[in-house]
């Protein structure tokens, strides 16, 4: 019997990006996402992933300590608690990227993974932290992730997470494959210009090199007061052959739904024996340089 997982991605603009009250910004973004998450469940989605730090604007466009107040503990903070309850009610697993408060003064860019019964399975902390080009000042906000490349067992497949800038680094994508990932989600906040040409290049390359499904999520719209560029959406799924199968528009709030045949992973690996033919004993310089 085929192993089909119906997966969903949500790309969403921020309704209150110019609002100075950060509590209102956060609340408005959460409220905007709730009906979209419910709609994904109504369309039969088994698992749904949200965009990078889904409950706010991409605040790394500036360096200001006020944004520290938007961070929460994982898993015991209010947003993950809310999403655990929602996942249980909807019977749908969720990947929930938020700003994590680990301890006073220590913050991570994190995605919590929740199963369809509302159980917290664990988290992924973004490993590669950019601090480059006007508007991407992430080292001011995030400590590099320190918990490896976990893969989470759900009823709907083995789930891995890679976050935004991570996608430029093939090493972690390979580790997720070696750890058994069948679907890797990459929640992002990416603007047009510098890296847009890589958006449909790198992640299909990860998918075919590691022979798993990839769900890539990007937000949409412009966010004031910084206006660092247009978040160009185009959230998509690609299969283990590296083919983009479902893609969203570049300028609208949208839910991308795809039926992923997890048996395709076996079919592709039976043809392209990349894991068999790896030569890790020859890659002696990768870890040390």
Image (cartoon, rainbow, N blue to C red):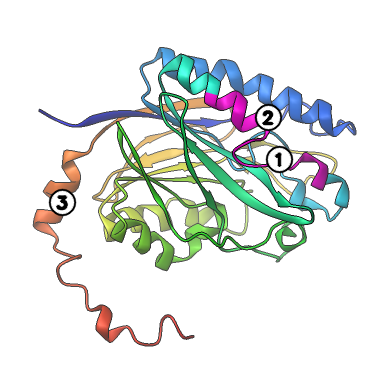
Image-quadrant location for residue 173: bottom left
Residue 268's disc number? 3
Question: What residue is pinned by disc 2?
Answer: 78
- Quarter of the figure that contains the N terminus: top left
Residue 127 in the image: above or below residue 237: below
Image-quadrant location for residue 251: top right
Considering depth in this image, is 281 or 146 the residue closer to the camera? 146
Left or right: residue 141 compared with residue 148 = right
Question: What residue is pinned by disc 1?
Answer: 72
C-beta proximity under 8 Å, tags 2 and 1 = yes
The location of residue 96, given as percent across then percent down, is 55, 36
| Residue 201 visible, this angle | no
Q: Give neighbour class at mark 2: few <14, some 14-19, many 20+ (Cα, 10 Å).
A: few
The location of residue 244, given as percent across then percent down, is 34, 43
Q: Give neighbour class at mark 3: few <14, some 14-19, many 20+ (Cα, 10 Å).
A: some
The location of residue 27, given as percent across then percent down, is 75, 24
Is label 3 in a helix, a strand or a loop?
helix
Point out the tag, 2 or 1, that comes first from the N-terminus: 1
Considering depth in this image, is 120 or 99 the residue closer to the camera? 120
Image-quadrant location for residue 283: bottom left
Point out the tag, 3 or 1, that comes first from the N-terminus: 1
Q: Magenta segment, which residues?
A: 68-84
Left or right: residue 42 compared with residue 5 = right
| Residue 179 visible, this angle | yes
The location of residue 162, given as percent across then percent down, is 48, 52
Q: Mark 3 to mark 1: distance in Å?
A: 40 Å
Report the label total.
Answer: 3
Left or right: residue 74 compared with residue 227 = left
Q: Point out the frontmost of discs 3 and 2.
A: 2
Q: Mark 3 to mark 2: distance in Å?
A: 41 Å
Q: Point out the frontmost of discs 3 and 1.
A: 1
Considering depth in this image, is 146 or 131 the residue closer to the camera? 146
């Amino acid at each position: 019997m085929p192993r089909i997982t119906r997966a969903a991605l949500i790309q969403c603009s921020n309704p209150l990006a110019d609002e100075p009250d950060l509590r209102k910004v956060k609340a408005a973004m959460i409220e905007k996402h709730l009906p979209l998450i419910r709609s994904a469940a109504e369309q039969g989605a088994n698992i749904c992933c949200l965009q990078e730090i889904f409950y706010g604007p991409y605040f790394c466009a500036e360096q200001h300590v006020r944004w520290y107040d938007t961070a929460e503990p994982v898993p015991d903070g209010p947003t993950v608690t809310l999403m655990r309850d929602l996942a249980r009610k909807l019977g749908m697993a969720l990947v929930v990227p938020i700003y994590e408060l680990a301890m006073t003064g220590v913050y991570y860019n994190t995605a919590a993974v929740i199963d369809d019964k509302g159980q917290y399975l664990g988290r992924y902390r973004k490993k590669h932290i950019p601090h480059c080009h006007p508007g991407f000042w992430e080292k001011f906000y995030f400590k590099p992730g320190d918990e490896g490349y976990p893969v989470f067992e759900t009823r709907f497949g083995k789930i891995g997470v890679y976050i935004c800038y991570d996608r430029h680094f093939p090493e972690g994508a390979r580790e997720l494959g070696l750890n058994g990932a069948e679907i890797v989600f990459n929640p992002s906040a990416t603007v047009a210009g510098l890296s847009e040409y890589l958006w449909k290049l790198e992640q299909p390359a990860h998918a075919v090199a590691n022979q798993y499904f990839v769900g890539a999520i990007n937000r949409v719209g412009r966010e004031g007061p910084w206006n660092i560029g247009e978040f160009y959406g185009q959230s998509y799924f690609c299969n283990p052959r590296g083919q983009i199968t479902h893609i969203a528009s570049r300028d609208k709030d949208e839910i991308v739904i795809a039926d992923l045949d997890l048996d395709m992973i076996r079919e592709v690996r039976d043809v392209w024996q990349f894991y068999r033919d790896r030569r890790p004993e020859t890659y002696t310089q990768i870890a040390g340089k």
